[in-house]
Amino acid sequence: LKIAFLSSFALEFLATISVALVAVIIGFRLFFGTLDFATGFVVLLLAPEFYLPLRQLGSHYHARLQGISAAADMLIILNAPLPEQQSEHTTDKISATISSITVNNLSFTYPNSDEGIKNINLSLPNKGLIAVVGASGSGKSTLFDCLLGFHPEVIKHISINQQILSTAHIGQLQSHIAWIPQSATLFYDTIAANIKLAKPNATQQELEHAAKQAGALGFIKALPDGFNTLIGEQGEGLSGGQKQRIALARAFIKQAPVLVLDEPTAHLDSETEQVIQHAIADYAKNNLVLVIAHRLNTVKNAEQLIVMHNGKIAQQGCFNSLAAEDGEFATLLQTAQQGAVHA
């Protein structure tokens, strides 16, 4: 910050003084009659443009520093040792039919930090809606990242169909999961291509069915080119709710046995929210749906509720039983502001 402020100040100061000197010189020459007004006026207009590159030098310099910093982070990843090679006992494939997911003594702490999760033990069914709630920093996202295989060092604590996973299984695990993060990524391409990212060989009928499930078919057909409408990077040109519905359609078209969501109705109006909630409930009838919940409706509709606190599972059960057993828990949920759940 010190370098940024000093360099910006120096460059702006030099550019401003230079333009001022040009103006003073033109003024004196006009006064003594050695320069006509038209020429002096044109030179005065061009002077700021002449010194513009000097002003831009500061922004380019800081962009260069950011690039160097980003490159350093990339080199750390590129130079990191490769995951352990697949051995004989890890060649078994994960079954396409997932009957159970078990987490045993899962602990993960971020480097140079005390934040993370500790001693997580979970037994998840093969279908149903499971909601994970908790205050900010309670470990919800970290738990999901571990289940998604983003932290290979703890994958051995996860079992599918009684089969302990290894780093060699991460690719297979992720192929069985459809994931929608808090901010879904959309690309500079057509809406159809963005939805079919999860299933490139999907038919037009499958495409429309997934969009209808996500409540996106109506606004997509209202666009001039429909599914062939080109959108900008990160969904530029669409509203937040429309982006979320396209991301949901992408997840639905994959028809993965496990669907992982981070509050899919956060950016939607009440009418569209009901459509999405109904679609998720239908999907959960035959598949496992894990959702980080911030809205009371999502919590009430969940078949099982997992309450996180300080990186641990504080409570677990259905909404009605937890509310009946713990008066404080029920009060916190009922009085949650703007639909956020504070456990």
Image (cartoon, rainbow, N blue to C red):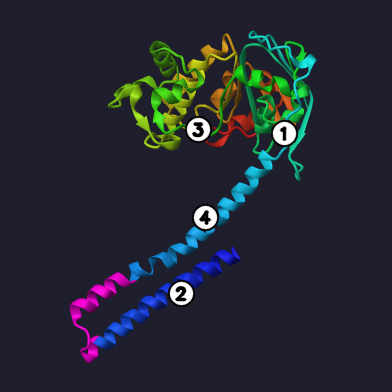
What's the amino acid at mark 1? His
| Residue 63, disc | 4
- Disc 4/disc 1 C-alpha distance (Å): 40 Å
Image quadrant occupied by the C terminus: top right
Compared to residue 295, the image places residue 49 above or below, namely: below
**Badge 2 or badge 4: first in the primary sequence:** 2
**Residue 56 appears in the picture as rendered:** yes
The boundaries of the magenta stretch are 30-47
- Relative image position of residue 10 (x, y in whole percent): 50, 72
Farthest residue toward the bottom?
32
Secondary structure at numbered mark 1 = strand
What's the amino acid at mark 4? Ala
| Residue 198, disc | none
**Badge 2 or badge 1: first in the primary sequence:** 2
Secondary structure at numbered mark 3 = loop
Mark closer to the observer (2, 4): 4
Residue that carries the numbered disc 1 in the rendered image: 309
Mark 1: few/some/many CA within 10 Å (<14, 14-19, 20+):
some
**Badge 4 or badge 1: first in the primary sequence:** 4
